[in-house]
Image (cartoon, rainbow, N blue to C red):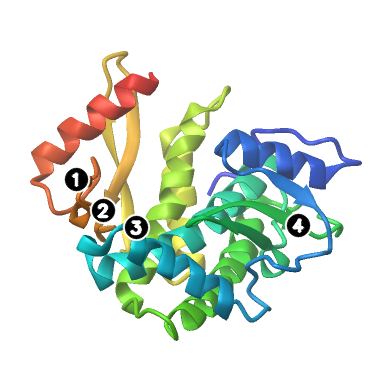
Amino acid sequence: MPTQSPIYQSDATAPLDALLQAAALAHPALAGEISADNAGLIGAQTDNHDILTQLHEYWRAACPEAGRPYWAVRSWTMLIWQPTFIAVAAVHGVGVAAPLSTLGQKYAQGIVAGFRIPPVALRPAPVPLLIERSGAELAQLCEALLAQLNRIAKVKPLIAMRLVADSLLSALARLSLLTPAPSNEDIQQWAQAWLRAMNLCGYSSLTPVPLSNGRLQLTLDRKACCLHYLRQDGELCASCPKQKPEVRIKRLTEEWNAYA
């Protein structure tokens, strides 16, 4: 497995600030703060019943036609997308493991976006070790959040963890947008290492598609459906496994060509 230096080199005196920068680079909605105060935020070590109820009720009211499975799955994907992207940004962008067990996630109007991390020391380590540690911590966080959500709205464990794997590999695929970008071989090896660390082998994968610029882009070969198509304004996502493979590859190629 590759053990190269982080893609985003952090200032050794400010790894927390570097993590916030790397997270924002990974996704513009990942706006982070450094604070030990997680009052009112979603966390793995707190009772989130009231916030999770608000989250689920928002989607029930916003999309009544989509039904219970969608409301539950939508709530779940909202809960886990930030931790997966932050975990990948920390390891492959800064060369540290994010403090996921003490991560606080902001919630407002059906959307989970924005986070706080405590002022703790983040120490560099080789990428394989960071993946092993961060993967285990991410798995524990997801287990805790799923247990809490399931008291309000049921998501089958297999579907829930497939969606976690999808989010994780989606974050890894986006590493190819960085300059300089890691090789597809490196990303594929990292993907398998993350899935092993979380006991999610076979739950999702990455497959290359050729772009108009001649580059092979790794895209999500997902096993789970997010149920977006059940909404009145919804449709099958480009990577949806409900489509025939040739349709999915065509749509993914068009989507990534837009980035290229």
Indicate which label's residue lies in the foreground, 3 or 2.
3
Q: Residue at x 54, y 49 (%)?
A: 85
Q: Name the residue rendered at 55%, 38% in the picture.
A: 27
Q: Which element carries disc 2, helix, strand or loop?
A: helix
Q: Nearer the viewer, residue 96 or 161?
A: 161
Residue 237, percent from left and from top: 24, 44
| Quarter assignment of residue 179 | top right
First reached walking from the N terminus: tag 1 or tag 3: 3
Q: Is residue 24 above or below residue 160?
A: above
Residue at numbered disc 2: 228
Separation of residues labelled 4 and 2 (CA atoms)? 30 Å
Residue on which the image places disc 4: 117
What's the mark number on residue 62?
3
Name the amino acid type tagged 3.
Ala
Q: Is residue 148 left or right of residue 58?
A: right
Q: Amino acid at mark 1?
A: Glu
Please say if the residues under marks 1 and 2 sit with CB atoms less than 8 Å apart. Answer: yes
